[in-house]
Image (spheres, rainbow, N blue to C red):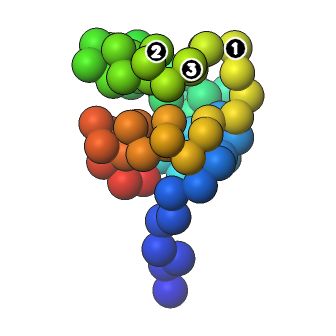
Amino acid sequence: MEQEFRIRSYSKLELAILYNPSMSIPSALRTLSRWIAANHRLCEELAMLNYNPRNRIFTPRQVQAIVTYLGEP
């Protein structure tokens, strides 16, 4: 039984693995970072939410923005 996705704080690693469960950890992290960088509207919204690519934790509001633009993992 799949668990329902909840909007909460996630580490970058957790979220990357949720979006790319069959990839290695480094590949999953790179892929999520590429998806974010390729979506200019998402980048703009994350910037307004004080996102810094060096941060290791996404806030619930940042996770909501990511889900809005990329869909649920």
31 sits left or right of 44 in the view: right
Q: Name the mark nearer the viewer: 1 or 2.
A: 2
Is residue 61 placed above or below 35 in the rendered structure? below
Q: CA distance from mark 2 to mark 3?
A: 5 Å
The residue carrying pointer 3 sits among few (fewer than 14), some (14 to 19) or many (20 or more) residues within 10 Å by Cα, namely: some
At 47% from the left edge and 74% from the top edge, which residue is drawn? Answer: 4
The number of discs equals 3
Q: Which residue, given by chain and number where applicable, does mark 1 sit on?
A: 54
Is mark 2 in CB contact (under 8 Å) with mark 3?
yes
Query: Which image quarter: residue 15?
Result: top right
Residue 19, how many percent across, how many down?
A: 47, 46
Kind of residue sitting beneath label 1 = Arg
Where residue 20 sits in the image (x, y, percent)? Answer: 50, 44
Q: Position of residue 69 (x, y in %)?
A: 28, 36
- The reply to whether dot 1 and dot 2 touch (C-beta < 8 Å) is no
Crowdedness of circle 2 by 10 Å Cα count: few (<14), some, many (20+)? Answer: few
Amino acid type, mark 2 = Ala
Q: Distance of mark 1 from mark 3, alpha carbons?
A: 9 Å
Which residue is the site of mark 3?
51
Residue furthest to the bottom in view is 1
Secondary element type, mark 3: loop
Q: Residue at x 61, y 14 (%)?
A: 52
Q: Where is 11 relative to 49, above or below? A: below
Viewer-proximal residue among 60 and 66: 60
Q: Earlier in the sequence, mark 1 or mark 2?
A: 2
Residue type of the residue flagged with mark 3: Tyr
Q: Which residue is mark 2?
A: 47
Q: Quadrant of residue 72?
A: bottom left
Mark 1 secondary-structure assignment: loop
User: Which residue is at the front of the view, 8 or 17?
Assistant: 8
Can I make out residue 21 in this image? Answer: no
